[in-house]
Image (cartoon, rainbow, N blue to C red):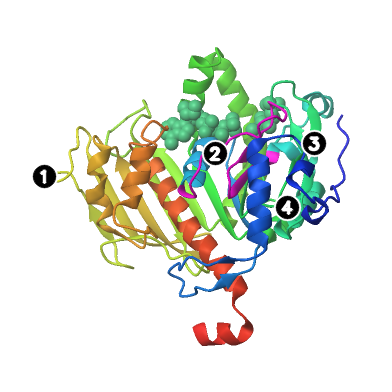
Amino acid sequence: MSIPLAPHPLTPSSLSTTEDVRLGSPLLRRQFVFYTNWRKGRRGRGASCGISCSAEARTVVIGLAADSGCGKSTFMRRLTSVFGGAAEPPRGGNPESNTLLSDTTTVICLDDYHLLDREGRKEEGVTALDPRANNFDLMYEQVKALKAGVAVEKPIYNHVTGLLDPPELILPPNLLFIEGLHPMFDPRVRDLLDFSIYLDISDEVKFAWKTQRDVEERGHSLESIQASIEARKPDFDAYVDPQKQYADVVIEVLPTQLIPGDNERKVLRVRMVMKEGVKYFNPVYLFDEGSSVSWIPCGRKLSCSYPGIKFFYGPDTYFSHEVSALEMDGQFDRLDELMYVESHLNNLSTKYYGEATEQMLKHGDFPGSNNGTGLFQTIIGLKIRELYECIVAEKSVTPLEAAKVF
Ligand SMILES: Nc1ncnc2c1ncn2[C@@H]1O[C@H](COP(=O)(O)OP(=O)(O)OP(=O)(O)O)[C@@H](O)[C@H]1O
Ligand SMILES: O=C(CO)[C@H](O)[C@H](O)COP(=O)(O)O
């Protein structure tokens, strides 16, 4: 059984020089220099929230929830890429660290807050999805500290050994992504989130993805994968799945409706459910905001091989919330033609024409680049950038100025 760690009281103000930043990682050092400059004040970059002025530093916190093996890492790589610079593990630190750092973003994997290690879970007869196997008090204290600009020493769950390793130093970044099984489970942590996303992978697709990874890359048998999915299912249904009701955006990944009886799961129907009324988040729409539109873009301007592509957009309700849903069934043949689709989507939060297509082309080798998972994850990255800029700009506006803006 592991020992819960107390939050570390180290604050950035107690770090007087970059030499004080432990772990020796050049990226962490760069992040520290960036961080100290940034806290001195920066200028809002004119996001379309109508605010642009000098901004006070603060850490914006985004939560991403999904089951294991459901594409969180791939999603995170797409998201952080929108902010420029590749996210890398802390160099010079524990090679089994689950953290990803770039100049402006930090991705923390919530597996690091497992209270029970692998052996401990076995002894207690609980899965990693069970709240009893996780330290929500520490998760809350540390996310709160980072949001308030205070560095923390976060534990590391080592997925190779199944043990909790000595902690690593985490500095407050501009944007903190917390990804894992439970970012929205504890109401205290949920309240710290500026924006939340739930990746909802249907059982059929989850099985296909797990099979592809664990059979082809890890040598597991089909039976053992099926057994592991089934063993986790009751806890997944009880503790992970219900979080989707709190998410600002849900990406549902479903079997295609374009191929009757398909069980290959190569072609996917992907649905982005966007909550209405979320501050600084204007849902994307197709052609005409608020109407219901079905669109088959295949023809002269978009090459589509069998079974083609079908988009759908329209208003809906989700857990009694008013939402807009954008759906794409099928897959792209040529990513460079995506421009045609981009030009029919509105509220994309791009900074220039074609930026979404450019992002997709940049990561054409990532899983899901030819379907709605890649497209919608890219769009969410662009929306989060805008949200971040708006929050930072808002923070800097005095009450008098704020009254003028709104
Ligand atoms: N959008 C996608 N389209 C198709 N396959 C995907 C997609 N995203 C992920 N996958 C598949 O799922 C596997 C797991 O993806 P990834 O490592 O990003 O998930 P994860 O949630 O971070 O996993 P874990 O929690 O186990 O670390 C990948 O190897 C890939 O085969
Ligand atoms: O659901 C998971 C989240 O990634 C893992 O299964 C959990 O973190 C336990 O890890 P391991 O299987 O390596 O003991």
* Secondary structure state at the residue bearing disc 4: helix
Dots 1, 2 in contact, CB < 8 A? no
Residue 320's disc number = none
Q: Amino acid at mark 3?
A: Pro
Q: Find residue 74 and report its horizontal and vertical position in percent.
A: 50, 36
Cα distance between the residues tagged 2 and 3 = 22 Å
Q: Is residue 132 visible?
A: yes
Q: Please tell me whether residue 108 belongs to the stretch shown in magenta.
A: yes
**Residue segment shown in magenta:** 82-110
Question: Does the beta carbon at disc 1 come under 8 Å from ligand 1?
Answer: no
Residue 167's disc number = 3
Q: Earlier in the sequence, mark 4 or mark 3?
A: 4
Dots 4, 3 in contact, CB < 8 A? no
Residue under label 1: 300
Q: Residues within 10 Å of mark 4 (few under 14, many from 20)?
A: many
Residue under label 2: 72
Q: Earlier in the sequence, mark 2 or mark 4?
A: 2
In this rendering, which labeled residue sits more in front, label 4 or label 1? 4
Residue 143's disc number = 4
Q: Residues within 10 Å of mark 1 (few under 14, many from 20)?
A: few
Q: Could you say which quadrant of the image residue 367 lies in? A: top left
Cα distance between the residues tagged 4 and 1 = 50 Å
Residue visible at 86% across and 39% down in the picture: 4
